[in-house]
Amino acid sequence: QNASLAIGGSFFATTAESVVFGDGIEFSATEPNQAPLLTINITPGLQMGTNPVNITVVGPGQTLNGSIFAPFDRSNISSQLQVQPGNTLALLGGEISLRGGLLSAEGGQIEIAAVGSNNSRSMVELTPVASGWDIDLRGATITVADNSSILTQNEGHKSAGNTILHGTETVTIGENDANGSINTFVANLTISSGDGGDLDIITNNLNVFGGAQVLLNTFGEGAPGNINIVASESVNIIGLGALNRDNQSDFTSDVNSLTFSEATAGDITISTNQLRVVVANILTFTAGKGNGGNISINANESIEIVGLISGINDQGLVSAASFSEGDGGSVDINTTRLLLADGGIIGASAFGKGNAGIVTINASESITLLDTLPTPFTSTQISSTITRPPVFFQRLFGLDPIPTANAGKITINTSELTISGDSDTQDAQIRVRNQGSGNGGELVIKADTINLNYGASIASSTFSGQGGNIELDIRNGLLLRNGSTITTEAENDGDGGNITINSDLLTLIESSLINANANRGDGGEIKITTQGLFVFPDSAITASS
């Protein structure tokens, strides 16, 4: 407890019982009467015994000042277990616990391995508050909780190493204390000319909850690494941090890759069986000249993105965004079943000069967009948008009030697409939109069936640029009912986009609408190829300008 190191080299601590040398001779730490073999100069191995002893590092905790928008200030961190720059600090034992303790190796390596009985992997646990390394953690379960942190921050000119969390059973990151100065996080930051390393999480189940964050941020010239998550069973990114007295939280659970410089942001890649994002974010964005990172998600079974729980928050987000000159990244999703509900969003967006990225979604069985609850700010959607920035964003990122970027393309491939809004409040939608001077994006959907209900919409709109086109290729049938719409619109001087529909059967009932409209420019064309067209008297197909 409250220990410190005063050594010039590396430090290795273990609870192993003995060292076995290459010729089979053993030096025992538990039977000191055996003759020490001090003259052997060969690579040794450690014998942990049947029940390895645990290692616990206890300290008073540390305070980090910073946020996702700035590097962390480590000047006020007191030294505990620390080696000289360029050396290695390693812990090997049974369960490894840091309880308010600090391990630090500037420019070196920290390696932690938890070994269970009979050399099986055990548990690594970090609780308030640990920080400050380039790290490799390995065990059966790894837990980072209660405002703890794992931080790799490259402040030099050489490339940083990787941050690796390898939990054969579970990796858990969360949760936060409402009184904590900063949230629980695992971060790899690049703030100088040296390149950053990857942030790798390998496990069966990854849980990020309670406002915890996984961050890969770039503030300097160096190229960042990437976030790579491989979870054979599930990834769950869920919920807010602790609520304050106003029933609000300062933190959402996030997996983010951000750039504030000329460097391109790192990519986020997730491979799993099931992914759940509930009142949480998977986000890449650029606030500099560098382009935003790409998001690639492969979930063999299902993906769920949900935005509202008990009225506390209104958004679950998977998005690539641009707030400056750099282009936003792309979003690429592959799964069997995709569900977006109550403020769940998949999108690519831009607020400045940089263009929005491309969104590609392949779901072999079904895609469902569903609004069932009154979400006052955000509807469930798949979108590529150019949005006029609010005044706060204009000041924060130096943006013009009217963006000049172009919207991106959305491509969707599935068997069954269902979009259902809430008849009183929200309209679930798939859309491309440009509120600036650039062009609207393009929307292409291929499906066996498409059903729109309760005000649901597939839409393209532009303010003054060329309107975006909508192309629907449907093998069986397209049904619009209860005020649902498919529309292209040019709001100012731009020309409206075209609507092209190929479907065996097309049905519009209950005040539904297909419309191509332009205000001052030319209206778009509507082209329909079908074997059966049924438009009930209360519905319509129109083109106007």
Image (tube, rainbow, N blue to C red):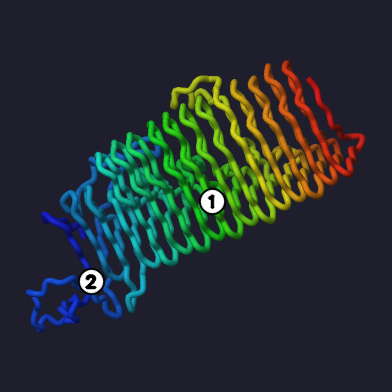
- Image quadrant containing the C terminus: top right
Q: Nearer the viewer, mark 2 or mark 1?
A: 1
Mark 2 and mark 1: Cα distance apart in space: 40 Å
Picture residue at 47% right of the left edge, 53% below the top: 208
Q: Is 441 placed left or right of 82 in the picture?
A: right
Image coordinates of residue 382 in percent, x first then y, are: 63, 41
- Label 2 sits on residue: 15
Q: Which mark is residue 471?
A: none
Residue 231 pos. (x, y %): 48, 60
Answer whether residue 159 is visible to the viewer in this image.
yes
Could you tell me which residue is drawn at 83 percent across and 28 percent down? 542
* Residue located 52% across and 63% down the image: 233
Secondary structure category for the residue under label 1 = strand
The spot of residue 515 in percent (x, y) is 79, 30
Residue located farthest toward the right when viewing the structure as drawn = 537
Pinpoint residue 534: horizontal percent, then vertical percent.
90, 41
Residue visible at 53% across and 28% down in the picture? 351
Quadrant in the rendering for residue 89: bottom left
Answer with mark 2 or mark 1, whichever residue precedes in sequence.
Answer: 2
Q: Quadrant of residue 4?
A: bottom left
Q: Mark 1: few, some, or many residues within 10 Å (few <14, many ≥20)?
A: many
Inspect the image, locate mark 1, and give the three-letter code of the amino acid beneath it: Ile
* 125 shown above or below 449: below
Which residue in the structure is indicated by mark 1?
A: 297
User: In the rendered view, does 357 fall on the left or right side of 482?
Assistant: left
| Quadrant housing the N terminus | bottom left
Given contact means CB atoms under 8 Å apart, are the residues at marks 2 and 1 in contact?
no
Task: Tell me if 492 is positioned left or right of 294 in this view.
Answer: right
Label 2 crowding class (10 Å Cα cut-off): few <14, some 14-19, many 20+? Answer: many
**Three-letter code for the amino acid on which mark 2 is drawn:** Thr
